[in-house]
Image (spheres, rainbow, N blue to C red):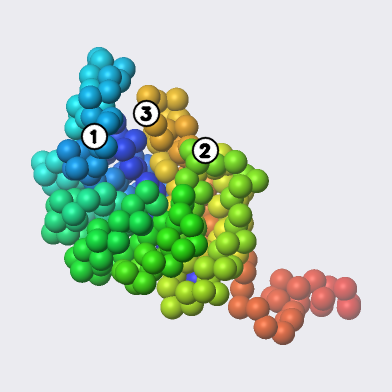
Amino acid sequence: MHTKIIAEGGINHNGDMSVARGLIDAAVVAGCDYIKWQKRNPDLCVPEHQKDKRKSTPWGEMTYLDYKKRIEFGRQEYDEIFNYCKGRIHCFASVWDKDSVDFMSPYTGIAKIPSALITDLELCSYARENFQTLIISTGMSTEEEIVKCVEACSPDVIMHTNSTYPSPVNELNLNYIHHLKSRWPSAEIGYSGHEYGLVSTFAAVAMGASWVERHLTIDRTMWGSDHLASVEPQGFIKLVKGIRDIESSLGLGGPRKVMGGEKLKQESLRK
């Protein structure tokens, strides 16, 4: 068993390549399998009624649309990101629109549809056509909406998610992992967490999640929408080690056997 661990850099780079490189370095040091970003065309993704709203940012006051464009990486940045990741860690992104599918598909064969967009069946189908591996997240969605998405795009990985940032532990409903495994046995089932702490993520692995995703930040006090629900580098090291220890401890099951260390103890007691 090898749980695939995704460090979501998301938009926690705040539009700064030096921060993005720091996030990649942290994910590599922790031993993650993937680092993931979010790719959008703000002109398409920002609702019309929000585009001209004023927003205070570290770069001054601007419209919400200008803010989203300010933190969005383009071709030059992603060329650098993929070069920086090469040979160190796999890299991909959540795609928020068809333009972003077209943008990311030359770089990688894997993509994710974020929770907010699994009801956009046209986008889901388009992403399915353009990526070898497709992941979806189930946050904010009803069972009916999830079923329609799965029927539309046959995702390879379905991630149980609560999309509150941060998520209250008593609303995580980790037992939904069992439901997903039973309903879609041909798909891999994962867990994308936004809660404080690591315990519930460890529990998800023990319950059978074969993919895990947590947001990564250099500093949870940084300015930005996702940092507070993210895990800092030291926490990510603990997360990966804990998951690997869980994998090692689960064993193969089956009838009870006396293990190697037990045999030594057994022999010492019989002398």
Relative image position of residue 254 (x, y in whole percent): 67, 83
The answer to whether residue 223 shows anywhere in this view is yes
Q: Is residue 31 left or right of residue 97?
A: right
For label 3, the SS is loop
Which of these two is toward me, 140 or 238? 140
Find residue 49 and report its horizontal and vertical position in percent: 27, 31
For the residues labelled 3 and 1, say whether their Cβ atoms are less than 8 Å apart.
no
Residue under numbered circle 1:
48
Residue 16 position (above or below residue 98) = above
In the rendered image, the vertical position of residue 23 relative to residue 257, given as above or below: above
- The disc placed on residue 166 is 2
Q: Position of residue 104 (x, y in %)?
A: 18, 54
Rendered-image quadrant of the C terminus: bottom right
Q: CA distance from mark 1 to mark 2?
A: 27 Å
x 46%, y 49%: residue: 140
Q: Nearer the viewer, mark 3 or mark 1?
A: 1
Q: Three-letter amino acid code at disc 1?
A: Glu
**Residue at the spot 59% in from the left edge and 50% down from the top edge:** 172
Position of residue 248 relative to residue 70, above or below, is below
Reading the chain from its start, which is encountered first: label 3 or label 1? Answer: 1
Residue at mark 3: 224
* Disc on the earlier residue, 1 or 2: 1
